[in-house]
Amino acid sequence: MYWIVSTFNQTGLTPVIYIYDLSDNSLLVDGANMTEVAKGGYKYNFTTWDGAKDYFVVCDAGSGRVAYQTISGSRVVEDGHTQDDIQRIMLSMRANLCSGGGTANQKFRNVADSKERVTLVVDTNGNRLSSTLDGTI
């Protein structure tokens, strides 16, 4: 989920939103209604947002009131892992369930305890020999 917010400085409008995927210029959201927040601010819940993609957004409130913005989601830090992926991985290692302590295979799970985020293979001294990372949703 990703909230897109736009300001038109006028209440009572009925703006619509258009969202394009910049990788292929495809139209993902075609004139969906935005909801007024307060004092001329409007929002849209972009539920199909993908943190690895970039988007172009047009918010149109009519009568020449148009707002443009881009959403840069493809914040790849290293080896295909985005900032969001890395935060999920770090959270799993710092705060979530872990199994295999004292063995050659240590596993760290996500908050929901539904998937392994990090799997480590260690030697008898606890040195990491290999790791598998999964920061995807």
Image: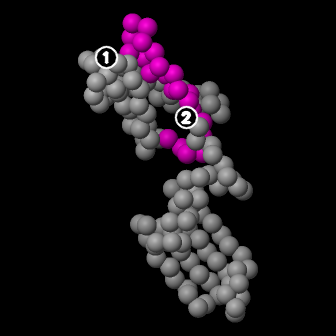
Residue that badge 1 annotates: 10
Residue 62, x across and y down, in percent: 39, 11
Looking at this view, is 49 or 74 the one in front?
A: 74
Task: Name the amino acid type tagged 1.
Answer: Gln
Q: Which residues are magenta?
A: 49-70
Q: Position of residue 3 (x, y in %)?
A: 41, 38
Number of numbered labels in the structure image: 2
Q: Quick check: is 96 in the magenta stretch? A: no
- Which residue shows up at 62% across the image and 31% down it? 22
Q: Residue at x 29, y 30 (%)?
A: 37
Crowding near the residue tagged with mark 1, few <14, some 14–19, many ≥20 C-alpha atoms within 10 Å: few
Residue 95, position as x, y percentages in the image: 46, 72
Location of residue 61 with respect to 70 vertically, above or below: above
Which residue matches tag 2? Answer: 71
Separation (CA) of disc 1 from disc 2 = 24 Å
Question: In the rendering, at what x and y percent does residue 85 appear?
Answer: 57, 56
Residue type, numbered disc 2: Ile
Q: Secondary structure at mark 2?
A: strand
